[in-house]
């Protein structure tokens, strides 16, 4: 998206955070800084010297390195091979390169083993390899694009320690994130971007998450908290000992049982890749269960095809909207039909009702604030957040009885987040049952009535969202805790602190305050 | 909003236009290299198109191209590459000719029956590839190519004199069809236009209606655009593959009928082969669009028929073949280029419009804030 009037400067040896809505221009700005796109006007200066960055290679020679949100590593190669790939000229590919990698790893406390295979590494380790790759190429300024999106809280803390090491050595870090708490915890300076332009700069010590969020959205801060419980005793979806096998009979899902009642939100917490995708596929009917049953409002739907499930009131906000939620090269109104082609207003008998579908697309665009010049543009030309709003609008328009919401606000700006939460909450009041899967623990805790933890295809723990903290949930997600998660004394203490803080601020924004507070306190709490 | 619509039409036309210009330019270069006039062949061919008998030939040829190309296009719309149109069409024509020679119903039953036989034969032959793909995961590209070869042998065997064939001089035929299955042509000054041109029109309209205006068509297009998104939206991908293959085969089956029922009334060694391969290029050039394919078929038929005259003017008529080849190559490249360019441009424009709107609202916000 277009940028205009962007001003900000990063001082040497600091972590500078960029926060802002998706679609407001963060990605474009990143591309410009990394030489992937040329600015129409304005200048970039490094160490006071104005530079033109024509390509990523230019940026690298100028000491700018980028750690992408999606890692760019070859699984079948070792760390050493991945690091030297493309920079063989720097230190060769043998002993000298290995020595250099060790050196960098030790200097910044990255703990990278040069001979490990990348496929054996966890997400956090891969991220450190990415950082090392950039440092190896001589970067003095690192750009990190949403580096915490894939990490659990403990890993986030470790990453922040690494970042502190980096800045202690005089490097500069540009840190992009949606998560205000994290930003406040790690950044020395924060620049807020709204609608393609910089709207302000903040210093963490003098800013609360609430102020920051308000700067970002330009209005009051949303919280994911649900007000009163609307849980009824009428079961909407009942899953009983569901098992799904992968190739070779390996269990992808094993003995999954849960019930979601009308008006209930069940949150599933877990590190990505522990069976969430398979669970969603089994519920929407993309994969058949190998054993076990699924019931929707009493009807057994285990063998129903996807279309019948959707017609019968299962709404679906997919994990990967590009793969499962949109036809990228089709216009918005065709995307509005997708998934509901047999339902009103899209169809009359076997015929499509193009006029009605188009009119309804206009309504969705307006009601859900999808920022687009019209409904004839392709879905690919919208930003990620706006694509998501369209999907949520489409699914909610068909008044689902059971909603599968996978990362419903991923990549969505704070303003739209509030709106999506409101939509879910409102539908929940009217009896919607929701299965919520999210990597955003605050969202999970704030929206859910019940929490379960998925680990290696099994539901290993459950928790009460009213009392659990993101840290406790985070450790359960790594398999460290099972059963019913009870609060321990440390947690009591930090909850007390929290309450105090919330009272001091006299604000309904406890959730974000908690986020910030925890992120700051966590290193001490976690002193193992 | 109109702006985007206009732009889409413009982009849709830009692809074929660029391809044609490039193909003509390259052909001229070939002519130059071989020491011939780079322009005269075109004027000869244009002149040919003004003669009424050539016009009839072009229209008749285009009718068959059109049916075969729509058959290919149905597959293309859902990312299926039915290379087997050629085998499906020849086998269907042969079967229809056989049935037509041995059954003699009144005309109002005979003609629909023959059309049905052709469609079923084509669908059956394509269905084999469809079933192989859905049950065993065999690529339809490989299986349809092999089925083409099998069809050739099967036809040769069935039309042997000891089986169903009838010898007529040196020619192996299937015997003359009953006259109740003949379809009269439309008499014009330059000759007879196949009566089954009506069938081509009906197929074109039906193709447009079904794909653009029905739930089934939407599912088919969605599957072609993104198989994973279509599956998540409730399309049964396997059934869709099989259905699309059957429809494609049924349409391929009737591609030979205008000639069979309108003129030759028997299937013999001179029955045109290779129609199904030509149709792939035509469907590409016509962008799988019902109207686009009309123009592409006419262009192809014109190149075929008008080029015959070149031999009498010291040029090789194969120039037209070179041009057809170059068009297909240029089309593939220019469509992709135009698509990518168009997508990028649209993204930029959406961005610009939103930024402009944001600037406006930002200014008013600032006034309101302080």
Image (cartoon, rainbow, N blue to C red):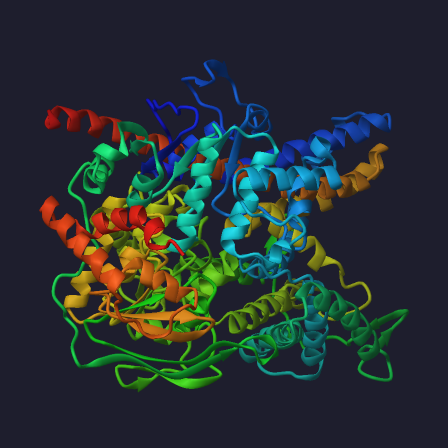
Residue A395 locus on image (x, y percent): 29, 61
Above or below for A309 versus B85? below
Q: In the displayed image of the protein, which residue is found farthest to the top?
A: A49
Q: Nearer the viewer, residue A229 or B150?
A: A229
Q: Residue at x 80, y 25 (%)?
A: B37
* Res. B306 image quadrant: top right
* Res. B93 image quadrant: bottom right
Residue B321 locus on image (x, y percent): 77, 43
Residue B314 as seen in the image, left or right of residue A253: right
Above or below for A91 versus A487? above
Which image quadrant: the N terminus of chain A? top left
Above or below for A269 versus A443? below
Residue A442 as seen in the image, left or right of residue B217: left
Which image quadrant: the C terminus of chain A? bottom left
Q: Residue at x 90, y 69 (%)?
A: B170
Q: Nearer the viewer, residue A26 or B167?
A: A26
Q: Nearer the viewer, residue B235 or A294?
A: A294
* Residue A410 seen: yes
Residue A190 locus on image (x, y percent): 31, 32
Q: Nearer the viewer, residue B302 or A458?
A: A458
């Amino acid at each position: 998206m277009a940028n205009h009037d962007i001003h900000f400067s990063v001082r040497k040896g600091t972590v500078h955070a960029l926060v802002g809505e998706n679609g407001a221009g963060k990605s474009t700005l990143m591309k410009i800084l990394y030489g992937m796109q040329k600015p129409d006007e304005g200048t970039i200066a490094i160490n006071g010297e104005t530079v033109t960055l024509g390509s990523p290679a230019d940026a690298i020679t100028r000491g700018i390195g980028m750690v992408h949100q999606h890692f760019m590593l070859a699984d079948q190669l070792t760390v050493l091979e991945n690091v030297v790939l493309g920079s063989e000229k720097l230190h060769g590919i043998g002993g000298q390169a290995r020595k250099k990698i060790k050196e960098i790893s030790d200097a910044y406390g990255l703990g990278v083993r040069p001979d490990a295979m990348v496929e054996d590494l966890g997400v956090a380790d891969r991220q450190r390899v990415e950082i090392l790759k950039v440092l190896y190429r001589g970067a003095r300024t690192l750009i990190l694009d949403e580096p915490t999106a894939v990490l659990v809280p403990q890993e986030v803390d470790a990453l922040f320690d690494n970042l502190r090491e980096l800045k202690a050595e005089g490097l500069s870090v540009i840190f992009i994130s949606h998560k205000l708490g994290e930003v406040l915890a790690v950044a020395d300076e924060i620049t807020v971007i709204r609608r393609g332009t910089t709207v302000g700069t903040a210093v963490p010590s003098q800013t609360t998450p609430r102020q920051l969020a308000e700067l970002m959205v330009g209005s009051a801060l949303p919280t994911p908290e649900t007000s009163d419980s609307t849980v009824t005793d009428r079961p909407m979806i009942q899953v009983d000992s569901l098992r799904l096998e992968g190739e070779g009979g390996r269990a992808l899902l094993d003995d999954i049982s849960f019930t979601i009642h009308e008006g209930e939100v069940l949150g599933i917490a877990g590190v990505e890749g522990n069976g969430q995708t398979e669970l969603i596929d089994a519920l929407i009917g993309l994969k058949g269960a190998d054993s076990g049953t699924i019931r929707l409002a009493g009807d057994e739907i285990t063998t129903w095809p996807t279309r019948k499930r959707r017609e019968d009131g299962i709404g679906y906000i997919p994990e990967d909207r590009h793969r499962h939620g949109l036809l990228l090269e089709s216009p918005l109104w065709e995307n509005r039909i997708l998934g509901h082609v047999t339902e009103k207003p899209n169809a009359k008998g076997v015929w499509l009702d193009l006029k009605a579908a188009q009119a309804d697309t206009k309504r969705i665009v307006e009601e859900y604030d999808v920022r687009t010049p019209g409904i004839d543009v392709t879905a690919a030309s919208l930003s990620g957040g706006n694509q998501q709003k369209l999907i949520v609008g489409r699914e909610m328009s068909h008044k689902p009885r059971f909603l599968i919401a996978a990362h419903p606000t991923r990549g969505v700006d704070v303003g739209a987040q509030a709106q999506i939460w409101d939509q879910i909450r409102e539908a929940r009041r009217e009896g919607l049952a929701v299965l919520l899967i999210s990597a955003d623990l605050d969202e999970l805790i704030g929206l859910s009535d019940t929490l379960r933890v998925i680990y290696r295809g099994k539901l290993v723990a459950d928790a009460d969202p009213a009392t659990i903290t993101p840290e406790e949930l985070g450790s359960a997600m790594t398999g460290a805790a099972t059963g019913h998660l009870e609060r321990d004394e440390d947690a009591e203490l930090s909850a007390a602190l929290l309450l105090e803080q919330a009272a001091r601020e006299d604000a309904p924004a406890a959730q974000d305050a908690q986020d910030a507070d925890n992120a700051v306190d966590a290193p001490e709490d976690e002193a193992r | 909003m109109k702006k985007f619509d206009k732009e889409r039409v413009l982009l849709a036309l830009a692809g074929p236009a660029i391809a044609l210009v490039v193909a003509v330019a390259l052909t001229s270069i070939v002519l130059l290299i071989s020491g011939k006039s780079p322009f005269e062949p075109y004027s000869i061919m244009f002149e040919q198109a003004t003669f009424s008998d050539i016009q009839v030939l072009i229209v008749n040829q285009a009718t068959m191209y059109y049916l075969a190309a729509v058959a290919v296009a149905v597959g293309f719309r859902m990312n299926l590459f039915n290379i087997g149109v050629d085998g499906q069409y020849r086998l269907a024509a042969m079967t229809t000719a056989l049935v037509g020679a041995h059954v003699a119903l009144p005309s109002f039953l005979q003609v629909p029956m023959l059309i049905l036989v052709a469609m079923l034969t084509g669908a059956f032959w394509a269905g084999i590839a469809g079933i192989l793909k859905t049950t065993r995961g065999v690529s339809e590209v490989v299986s349809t190519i092999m089925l083409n070869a099998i069809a050739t042998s099967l036809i040769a065997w069935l039309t042997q004199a000891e089986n169903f064939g009838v010898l007529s001089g040196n020619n192996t035929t299937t015997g003359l069809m009953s006259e109740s299955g003949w379809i009269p042509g439309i008499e014009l000054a330059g000759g007879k236009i196949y009566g089954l041109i009506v069938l081509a029109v009906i197929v074109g309209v039906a193709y447009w209606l079904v794909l653009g205006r029905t739930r089934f068509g939407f599912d088919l297009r969605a599957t072609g655009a993104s198989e994973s998104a279509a599956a998540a939206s409730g399309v049964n991908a396997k059934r869709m593959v099989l259905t699309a293959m059957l429809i494609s085969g049924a349409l391929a089956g009737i591609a030979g009928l205008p000639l069979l029922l309108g003129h030759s009334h028997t299937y013999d060694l001179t029955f045109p082969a290779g129609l199904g391969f030509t149709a792939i290029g035509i469907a590409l050039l016509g962008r799988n669009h019902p109207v686009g394919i009309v123009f592409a078929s006419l262009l192809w038929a014109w190149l075929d028929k008008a080029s015959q005259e070149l031999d009498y003017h010291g040029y090789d008529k194969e120039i037209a073949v070179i041009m057809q080849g170059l068009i297909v190559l240029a089309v593939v490249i220019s469509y992709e280029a135009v698509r990518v360019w168009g997508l990028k441009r649209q993204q930029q424009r959406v961005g610009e419009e939103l930024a402009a709107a944001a600037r406006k609202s930002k200014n008013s916000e600032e006034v309101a804030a302080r």
